[in-house]
Amino acid sequence: MIVPMPTSAPRRTGSFVLTEDVTVRVTGQARTAAAMLREHIFRETGYLLAESPDGMLMVSHDPAMRGLGPEGYALLVSNDAVMLRAGTQAGLRHGVQSFRQLMTRDATVRAADLRDSPKFAWRGVSSALLPPAEMRKAIDRMAAYKLNVLHVFPDGDPDALRDLVEYGRDHGIIVVPELSPATIELLELFPSRWVHIGTAKLTTRFAGLLERHGKLPVRWHDGGADVLGPHGKLAEGDDGLRAVATAGWAGGLRTTSAVAPAW
C-alpha cells in the first residue's frame, strides 16, 4: 500500500525486475529526481544504474503534467518498464517516494499505475530543535510520507538553522519558524512565506512587520476559520507521520491563517 493513498491507483499485476543491466532514461529537468532514484536503488540492491537514452526506467520532467497540480505525478510500473512523470520537481520527488514504497527486498518493483496529487497544500509536523543529525533523519522520514512543512521553534546556532533550512529545501520540506515580536530578528534565516505565531494574537504592528517582509502569519486553529491542512507532532513518531500523510489529524492540532490582526 502506498502512503498516502494515491488519488488514482487501479489494481495491476506483475512486477518490474531490477538488475544491474537496467538503465535510466532522464528527460527534461529531471536529473535531481533521477539521482535520488538511482541512489535508493543502489542502497537497496547494490546496482549502480547507468543512464541511457533508451533506458527502461524513465524519469521525466514533463510540463504537460501540470494538470495534476504543483505536487502531482504519474508513475507507471509494468513488467517491461517504469515511467515516472511530473510537471514539477516536487511532483518528481513524490513519485520517487512512491517508487521506493513499491520496491520489495528481492529487487523487484510491484506493478502500479498511479496518478496522485496531495489534497492539502500544508502537510506538517512541529518539533523543538533536535541535534542536527536527528533533524535530518526527521526530514528524511517526512519526505518519505510526502509531508512538506516542518514547524520549528528556532533557538540556538543560526548556522545550524541555515543548514536545517537548506536540507529541508533539498528534500521538499519547508521549514516554518514560530516567531514572536521578540524573536523577529531570526526572520531572515527562513525563506518560508509562512510564519507561525503559535497561539498569540496578531497585533497590527506585528502583522505590518510580517507583511513588509512578504510573510503570511499562521496560528493554531481555534474553530473560527478553515484549516490549511493536517498537522502533527514529530514526537508522535512514525504513526503520527502516517496519520498526517493520510490526512488524519495527529495530536488534535490544526493550523489556520491569521491574516486578521487583533488590536
Image (spheres, helix red, strand yellow):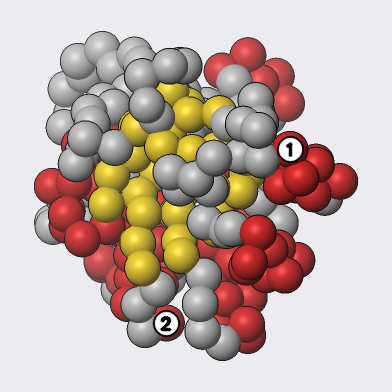
Q: Residue at x 61, y 39 (%)?
A: 202
Quadrant in which residue 1 is drawn: top left
Using residue 136 as the reference point, say whether residue 217 is left or right of it: right
Judged from the image, the secondary structure of the residue bearing numbered disc 2 is helix
Judged from the image, the secondary structure of the residue bearing numbered disc 1 is helix
Q: How many marks?
A: 2
How far across and how far down the image is residue 219, in percent?
49, 38
Is residue 160 something that shows in the picture? Answer: yes
- Identify the residue under disc 2: 132
Q: Amino acid at mark 2?
A: Pro
Q: Amino acid at mark 1?
A: Thr
Q: Residue at x 22, y 28 (%)?
A: 248
Using residue 248 as the reference point, say whether residue 197 is left or right of it: right
Near mark 2 (Cα within 10 A), the count class, few <14, some 14-19 or many ≥20, is few
Q: Which quadrant of the rendered structure holds the C terminus? A: top right
Quadrant in which residue 35 is drawn: bottom right
Q: Residue at x 34, y 39 (%)?
A: 231
Near mark 1 (Cα within 10 A), the count class, few <14, some 14-19 or many ≥20, is few
Q: Which of the two discs, 2 and 1, labels the residue nearer the N terminus?
A: 2
- Identify the residue under disc 1: 204
Using residue 98 as the reference point, say whether residue 96 is left or right of it: right
Q: Is residue 25 above or below residue 120?
A: below
